[in-house]
Image (cartoon, rainbow, N blue to C red):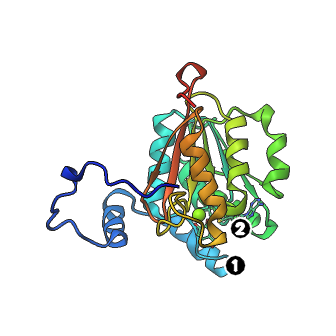
């Protein structure tokens, strides 16, 4: 790949007072725009008590997913990678009463913790966990789609295949969001691979940014999220 080009240098002038730590800034924004209620807080407590790793999305990411789901009037949401149900609660709360969240999880212990989180948050009427390796459960979902929003947050090696499935299960206008896509820049396909752990994410960003059926952007929120909208065939970009 080529070097990063320095575009629009006139927009890169001094920004006195804005050079703050990104995490502190996100935490400060979250206090105002994404406060956690008891059910979300207790989901993190439940995850810790059951020995699940502390790798849920942040409150700010949860609020962003909610806003996107609301903006596209999502009635059907698919999540790949449930963990304790933290992101699932944010997503399910953006659904109408007859909406549906299907979330895929390989680990039956995680699935049961998430089911308890959904009950406590009173979204168990619309949020359902399906257990199994996602590549085995995804092929059975066609009849339940198309999904309005798909959130990818499971094993990183498989991200490129999850993107292909997401497109299969989407419609024009659907949103596809993927977590952990930027990190320290390691997830971006602009440099030679130096760390094999990021190969899947780099390939994901390469596909998302170049697929003519998608319009995509990577957002520097927490460890980065890549957001794509599925285009109508007539809107397809030149390949
Ligand atoms: N979305 C969650 C965090 C997910 S962490 C949140 O923000 O609250 C990643 C999850 O993906 C873990 O629970 C892990 O068990 C699950 N996972 C890993 N590989 C998987 C696979 N092949 N299929 C389905 N789930 C998988
Ligand atoms: C890991 C996975 C995630 O989805 C995440 O947000 C952070 C870390 C991990 O597998 O280490
Ligand atoms: Mg993640």
Task: Tell which residue pokes out farthest to the top in this image.
Answer: 234
Q: Quadrant of residue 114?
A: bottom right
Which is nearer the N-term, disc 2 or disc 1? Answer: 1
Q: Position of residue 134 (x, y in %)?
A: 78, 54
Quarter occupied by residue 12: bottom left
In this rendering, position of residue 44 left or right of residue 219: right
Q: Are marks 2 and 1 in contact (CB under 8 Å)?
A: yes
Q: Residue at horizontal 83%, vertical 42%?
A: 139
Q: Position of residue 169 (x, y in %)?
A: 71, 36
Which quarter shows the C terminus? top right
Q: Position of residue 212 (x, y in %)?
A: 58, 33
Residue depicted at x 56% and y 29%: 231
Judge the density around disc 2: few (<14), some (14-19), many (≥20) Cα neighbours within 10 Å: many
Q: Is residue 138 left or right of residue 221?
A: right
**Can residue 127 be seen here?**
no
Q: Quadrant of ligand 3?
A: bottom right
Q: Which residue is mark 2?
A: 113
On residue 171, the disc is: none
Is 212 in front, or is 179?
212
Q: Looking at the picture, does residue 199 appear above or below residue 126?
A: below
Image height of 169 relative to 128, above or below: above
Q: Residue 111 at x, y = what percent?
A: 75, 63
- The reply to whether the residue tagged 2 has its Cβ within 8 angstroms of ligand 1 is no
Could you say whether the residue bearing mark 2 is in a helix, strand or loop? helix
Q: Which residue lies under the disc numbered 1?
A: 50
Of 142 and 36, which appears nearest the observer?
Answer: 142
Answer left or right for 238 relative to 136. left
| Number of other residues with Cα within 10 Å of mark 1, as a class: few under 14, some 14 to 19, many 20 or more | few
């Amino acid at each position: 790949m080529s070097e990063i080009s320095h575009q629009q240098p006139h927009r890169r002038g001094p920004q006195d007072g804005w050079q703050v730590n990104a995490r502190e800034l996100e935490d400060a924004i979250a206090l105002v725009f994404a406060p956690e209620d008891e059910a979300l807080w207790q989901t993190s407590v439940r995850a810790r008590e059951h020995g699940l790793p502390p790798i849920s999305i942040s409150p700010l990411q949860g609020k962003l997913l909610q806003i996107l789901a609301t903006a596209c009037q999502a009635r059907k949401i698919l999540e790949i990678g449930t963990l304790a149900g933290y992101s699932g609660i944010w997503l399910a709360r953006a659904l109408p009463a007859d909406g549906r969240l299907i979330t895929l999880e390989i680990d039956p212990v995680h699935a049961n913790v998430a089911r308890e989180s959904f009950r406590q948050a009173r979204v168990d009427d619309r949020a359902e966990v399906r257990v199994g390796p996602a590549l085995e459960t995804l092929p059975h979902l066609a009849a339940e789609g198309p999904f309005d929003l798909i959130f990818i947050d499971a094993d990183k090696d498989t991200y490129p295949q999850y993107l292909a499935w997401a497109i299969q299960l989407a419609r024009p206008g659907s949103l596809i969001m993927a977590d952990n896509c930027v990190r320290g820049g390691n997830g971006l396909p602009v440099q030679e691979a130096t760390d094999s752990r990021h190969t899947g994410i780099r390939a994901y960003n390469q596909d998302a940014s170049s697929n003519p059926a998608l319009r995509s952007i990577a957002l520097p929120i927490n460890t980065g999220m890549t957001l794509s909208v599925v285009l109508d065939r007539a809107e397809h970009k030149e390949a």
